């Protein structure tokens, strides 16, 4: 065996053992509490069980419905729509009422890109004050020529609505950023409602209409 290969062998063995231990510990598949408890509560992944489970753990949050969603919906909800014209607002306040924000997307995952975090647990932490809005990155927003304000930070916006918050910190996107994210615009309801993926065929509907949800699982 070449001298360099002999020197590298202990290092490679250490890396392999470390990765194996990390995977065995479950860190690779770590999920936040709301999603980690799903398989234990509903071992057969029954739709009715999942609807009941997510209905229970979102009690007290501003959620409209937990419902079974047709698989076809997830495909249709990702079809981009024409983007409204961008307008540079005269004033750019650093805080806005979350109720003014419209969803560009028709649907969103309940898990953040970092799958250790999700909208349900974040909403609970925001509601109890364990997490403050200032602890999170500001909501990225933009305004169109009709004066409508759209969010590009869907999961954080969702969590703040679900927590029943009002004024939230925002930062204003420039036109080039909005155009780069134009494929986000898939909403077919004017941005007032969004469906959150919780499981393969179970979704959580959140409306941003000031009603704080009907709390009627179906």
Image (spheres, rainbow, N blue to C red):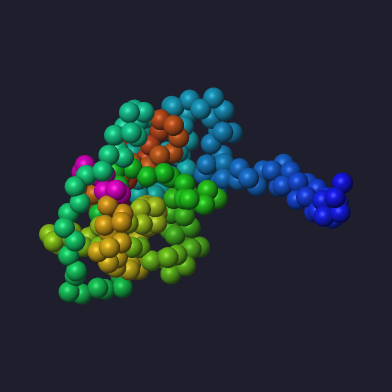
**Residue at screen point 17% across, 65% down:** 87
Q: Main secondary structure of the magenta part?
A: loop
Image height check: is 26 above or below 67?
below
Image height check: is 87 above or below 63?
below
**Res. 123 visible in picture:** yes
**Residue at screen point 72% across, 41% down:** 24
Query: Which is more toward the observer, 134 or 63?
Result: 134
> Where, quadrant-wise, is the C terminus in this rendering?
top left
Give the residues in magenta: 183-189
Residue 88: % across, % down: 19, 69
Q: Furthest-front residue in view?
A: 2
Q: How many marks?
A: 0
Q: Furthest-left residue in view?
A: 146
**Residue at screen point 27% across, 63% down:** 176
Q: Is residue 44 magenta?
A: no
Residue 169: % across, % down: 35, 68
Image height check: is 195 above or below 137?
above
**Residue at screen point 82% across, 55% down:** 4
Residue 214: % across, % down: 30, 42
Residue 15: % across, % down: 75, 50
**Res. 164 visible in picture:** no
Query: Which is more toward the observer, 46 or 213?
Result: 46
Q: Quadrant of residue 189?
A: top left
């Amino acid at each position: 065996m070449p001298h360099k290969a002999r020197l590298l062998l202990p290092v490679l063995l250490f890396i392999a053992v470390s990765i194996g231990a990390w995977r065995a510990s479950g860190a690779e598949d770590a999920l936040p509490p709301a999603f980690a408890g799903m398989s234990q509560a509903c071992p057969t992944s029954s739709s009715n069980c999942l609807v009941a489970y997510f209905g229970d753990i979102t009690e007290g949050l501003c959620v409209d419905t937990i419902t079974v969603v047709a698989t076809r919906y997830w495909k249709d909800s990702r079809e981009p729509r024409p983007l409204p014209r961008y307008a540079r607002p005269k004033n750019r306040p650093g805080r806005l009422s979350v109720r003014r924000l419209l969803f560009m997307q028709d649907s969103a995952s309940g898990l953040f890109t970092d799958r250790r975090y999700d909208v349900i647990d974040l909403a609970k932490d925001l509601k109890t004050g364990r997490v403050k809005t200032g602890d999170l990155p500001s909501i990225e927003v933009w305004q169109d020529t009709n004066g409508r304000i759209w969010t590009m930070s869907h999961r954080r916006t969702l969590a703040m609505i679900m927590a029943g918050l009002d004024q939230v910190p925002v930062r204003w996107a420039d036109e080039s950023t909005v155009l780069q994210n134009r494929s986000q615009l898939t909403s077919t309801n004017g941005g007032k409602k969004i469906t959150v993926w919780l499981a393969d065929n179970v979704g959580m509907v959140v409306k941003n209409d000031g009603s704080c949800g009907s709390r009627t699982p179906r």
